[in-house]
Image: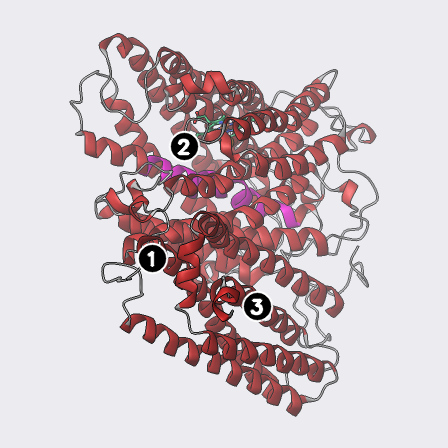
């Protein structure tokens, strides 16, 4: 066994004052700072989810009032969507590893990167202020005219918060795109890029093209609320459905901002733990771009029952089916990568397995919803809730944890307990299915979403769901516990504990302040595991 | 691959051009990154205005009479004057970039100042226009008054008028702020024939904001004017 060299000066200990963190322009530190804020948002969002699940254990509205319930599910989704799912993989893992992966010293615009973090935190504080003053009750979708003319909750503050946060996302996308174009090390050609980088590139495209639209849309609602402008106001002849079009023009592509980066993570982890090149590399790479582009052409599948013309509904239904193809390409290729691989059973791979199973269910149920006839029955029921949780929590969050477990040794220089991490992955998987599978049935039986009371015959399934949520909570808490513990007691990881390919593993753990002692030169593809003669236990 | 990359170059850029930041290998690479960054930013700006323009398009198709009425109430002379002012400012901006490229420091400062003066003139005229609308109660909201068969929809027109021109004016204000920083840098001799990227990308931004106005002017001021000249 070789002795592990701990770099004397690394990005963590090079300076340790608070100011050195708050003013840092190091992409690695900025990634860690995002982790802190996102973890806080995740915790807050979970508390509201707990409130929702407690209320739903009984058919009567006995835990909270209808009005409070509206605020609970809205604040849950606002925190989870805008402050967790959107930034979780790109801003944390992307910031940390992407420049390392392409052999750069930093992103193209380090100061802008820091500014993005401050913009993000400012938006977060506005949303917290909205919460402190009583929260918002419109649902995370802010449909007009409820949000613009009717609701008496703090829509304006939360809207400003989301508007501001949007710019953090735009600036991160811009930074990543320029970084990938202009900062690659010598020899790092496009088709040698790790697939995570391709995924981030596609994500940046969506951030750049989509986010400004939702920002201006929220801005229009704000003008309407603050000054009485009338852009969506039906009393003047304005069209509230226009809001839905503009909102989903962003928010459908936004679901790909949430899922594309975790998909990139999956490619990295699967290649490493099956010790193989990713099957059909270029197909996986291009499917990311295809998703980014076609994702912009399906938004109206959220409006099938909003009175749009049946002909446009048919087109959007067809395109929604089509957009599932690139996702399927990825799923098949991942499976083919595992096939006859030398599977190395380690915790990151367990999270990947969780992702694969849950994403599959989430994606396929999306096709149910994209079918015109079926959606009339399923729209605004718990079926939809189950669908997107399977993808966003089962897919995106599982994928994030796969990545976090994969790169944690790189980020901190420490190993966590593999056994506990495997147990946690299992707990989350079981808890997740227990929570959300009953919701498919509930929705199919006709239970609408966003109500705090329901008929008695739905109680059994709701109690199942709430108890699953407790298992889920235990699973997530376990992760927090052993990861924090590893910071103090974890074994030293060494530069490359997974014997992985990829430039990020060629520098020390934790990495040096400027990443590499000298600019690396690349002369092979991203996943040449077959050339590595390493035996793994 | 970016041009002129040097493997194993000195990681801190000591002994390099003072404007070269540590994470870039060459000034070329830094210049290309900044320019690409600005172009990408302008794409996001197109989408940003795009949301409002989408609303404009929809309602214009739905309510052509209201659009014609509302448009007639805008002051075409002030709007036209402002259009000329902005086109002139694009010229002075282009001359400033040219001067920076050739290393003519005093000319750079002069043209930048001229651009800022024109930008401020535009904003001043905009204030006059807004004040007039305010007096006529043409600002949407509780105090909006409009006599005419399509008064309600005209309020939508004015909402979009203020939304679009307000957003544009905000961009102008940011532009003038940006140019004051660049002018200050130019007067301190920060730019040279080797390094003038900040002037160039501020120019890109400025031209973009001008182009937005070139679209806004006909879309807002010239709806259906032809019928009223005949
Ligand atoms: C396989 C491709 C997918 C298809 C065909 C699809 C289809 C649909 C359809 C038709 C709806 C509307 C249901 C209704 O409201 O009646 C829907 C809702 C939703 N989907 Fe998907 N989806 C897909 C992938 C995704 C992904 C990848 C995510 C997230 C990462 C996602 C997140 C959501 C969310 C959040 C909603 C509900 C929004 C709301 O009303 O609050 N979907 N999906
Ligand atoms: Cu969608």
Q: Are marks 3 and 1 in contact (CB under 8 Å)?
A: no
The x, y position of residue A171, in whole percent, is 54, 55
Examine the image and state in which quarter residue B151 appears. bottom left
- Mark 1: is the Cβ under 8 angstroms from ligand 1? no
Q: Say which of B209 and A198 sits in front.
A: B209
Residue A84 is inside the magenta segment: yes
Residue A380 is inside the magenta segment: no
> Please, which chain is the residue tagged with disc 1 on?
B
The answer to whether B10 is drawn above or below residue B76 in the figure is above
Q: Which element type, helix, strand or loop, lies under badge 2?
A: helix
Examine the image and state in which quarter residue A443 appears. top left
Measured in 3D between alpha carbons, the distance from the residue under mark 1 to the one under mark 2, in whole angstroms, is 57 Å
The x, y position of residue A467, in whole percent, is 32, 16
The x, y position of residue B133, in whole percent, is 33, 71
- Main secondary structure along the magenta-highlighted residues: helix
- Mark 2: is the Cβ under 8 angstroms from ligand 1? no
**Magenta-drawn segment:** A75-99
* Residue to which mark 3 is pinned: B214
Residue at screen point 28% across, 56% down: A228
Q: Say which of A375 and A274 sits in front.
A: A375
Residue at screen point 68% across, 41% down: A198
Could you classify mark 3 by the number of other residues whose Cα lies within 10 Å: few (under 14), some (14-19), or many (20 or more)? some
* Residue to which mark 2 is pinned: A481
First in sequence: mark 3 or mark 1? 1
> Please, which chain is the residue tagged with disc 2 on?
A
- Share a chain, discs 1 and 2? no
Could you classify mark 1 by the number of other residues whose Cα lies within 10 Å: few (under 14), some (14-19), or many (20 or more)? many
């Amino acid at each position: 066994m070789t002795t592990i060299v701990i770099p004397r000066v690394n990005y963590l200990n090079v300076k340790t004052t608070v100011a050195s963190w708050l003013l840092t322009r190091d992409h690695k530190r900025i990634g860690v700072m995002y982790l802190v804020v996102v973890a806080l948002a995740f915790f807050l969002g979970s508390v509201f989810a707990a409130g929702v699940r407690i209320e739903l254990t009984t058919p009567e509205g006995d835990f909270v009032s209808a009005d409070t319930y509206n605020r609970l599910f809205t604040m849950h989704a606002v925190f989870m969507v805008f402050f967790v799912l959107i930034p979780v993989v790109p801003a944390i893992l992307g910031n940390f590893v992407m420049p390392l992966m392409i052999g750069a010293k930093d992103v193209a615009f380090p100061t802008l990167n820091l500014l993005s973090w401050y913009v993000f935190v400012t938006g977060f504080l506005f949303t917290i202020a909205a919460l402190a003053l009583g929260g918002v009750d419109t649902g995370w979708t802010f449909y007009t005219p409820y949000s613009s003319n009717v609701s008496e909750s703090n829509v304006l503050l939360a809207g400003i918060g989301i508007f501001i946060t949007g710019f953090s996302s735009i600036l991160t996308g811009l930074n990543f795109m320029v970084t990938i174009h202009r900062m690659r090390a010598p020899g790092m050609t496009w088709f040698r890029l790790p697939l995570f980088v391709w995924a981030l590139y596609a994500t940046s495209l969506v951030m750049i093209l989509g986010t400004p639209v939702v920002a201006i849309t929220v801005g229009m609602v704000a003008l309407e609320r603050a000054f009485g402008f009338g852009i969506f106001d039906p009393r003047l002849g304005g069209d509230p459905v226009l809001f839905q079009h503009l909102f989903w023009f962003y928010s459908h592509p936004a679901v790909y901002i949430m899922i594309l980066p975790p998909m990139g993570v999956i490619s990295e982890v699967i290649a490493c733990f099956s010790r193989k090149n990713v099957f059909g590399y270029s197909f996986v790479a291009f499917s990311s771009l295809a998703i980014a582009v076609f994702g912009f052409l399906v938004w109206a599948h959220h409006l099938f029952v909003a009175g749009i013309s049946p002909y446009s509904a048919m087109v959007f239904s067809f395109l929604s089916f089509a957009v599932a193809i690139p996702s399927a390409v990825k799923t098949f290729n991942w499976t083919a990568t595992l096939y006859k691989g030398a599977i190395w059973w380690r915790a990151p791979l367990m999270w990947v397995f969780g992702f694969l199973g849950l994403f599959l269910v989430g994606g396929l149920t999306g096709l149910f919803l994209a079918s015109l006839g079926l959606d009339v029955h399923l729209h605004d029921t718990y079926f939809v809730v189950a669908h997107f949780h399977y993808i966003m929590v089962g897919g995106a969050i599982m994928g994030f944890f796969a990545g976090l477990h994969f790169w944690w040794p790189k980020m901190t220089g420490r190993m966590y307990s593999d056994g506990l991490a495997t147990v946690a992955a299992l707990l989350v998987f079981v808890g997740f299915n227990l929570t959300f599978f009953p919701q498919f049935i509930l929705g199919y039986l006709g239970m609408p979403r966003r109500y705090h009371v329901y008929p008695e015959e739905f109680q059994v399934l709701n109690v199942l769901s709430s108890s699953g949520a407790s298992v889920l909570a235990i699973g997530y808490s376990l992760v927090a516990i052993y990861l924090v513990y590893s910071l103090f007691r974890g074994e030293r990881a060494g530069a490359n504990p997974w014997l992985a390919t990829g430039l990020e593993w060629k520098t020390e753990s934790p990495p040096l302040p400027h990443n590499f002692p000298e600019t690396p030169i690349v002369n092979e593809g991203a996943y040449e595991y077959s050339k590595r003669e390493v035996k793994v236990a | 691959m970016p041009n002129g990359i040097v493997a194993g170059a000195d990681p801190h850029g000591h002994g390099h051009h003072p404007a070269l930041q540590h994470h870039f290998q060459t000034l070329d690479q830094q210049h290309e990154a900044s320019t690409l960054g600005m172009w990408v930013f302008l794409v996001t700006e197109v989408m940003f205005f795009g949301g409002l323009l989408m609303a404009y398009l929809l309602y214009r198709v739905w309510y052509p009479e209201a659009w014609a009425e509302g448009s007639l109430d805008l002051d075409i002379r002030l709007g036209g004057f402002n259009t000329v002012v902005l086109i002139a400012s694009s010229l002075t901006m282009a001359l400033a970039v040219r001067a920076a490229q050739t290393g003519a420091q005093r000319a750079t400062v002069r043209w930048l100042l001229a651009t800022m003066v024109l930008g401020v003139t535009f904003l001043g005229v905009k204030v006059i226009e807004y004040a007039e609308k305010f007096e006529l109660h043409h600002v949407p909201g509780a105090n909006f008054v409009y006599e005419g068969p399509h008064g309600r929809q005209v309020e939508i027109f004015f909402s979009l008028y203020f939304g679009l021109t307000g957003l544009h004016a905000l961009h102008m204000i940011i532009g003038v702020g940006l140019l004051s920083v660049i002018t200050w840098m130019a007067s301190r001799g920060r730019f040279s024939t080797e390094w003038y990227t900040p002037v160039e990308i501020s120019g890109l931004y400025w031209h973009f904001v001008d182009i937005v106005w070139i679209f806004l002017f006909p879309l807002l001021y010239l709806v259906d004017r032809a019928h009223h000249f005949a």
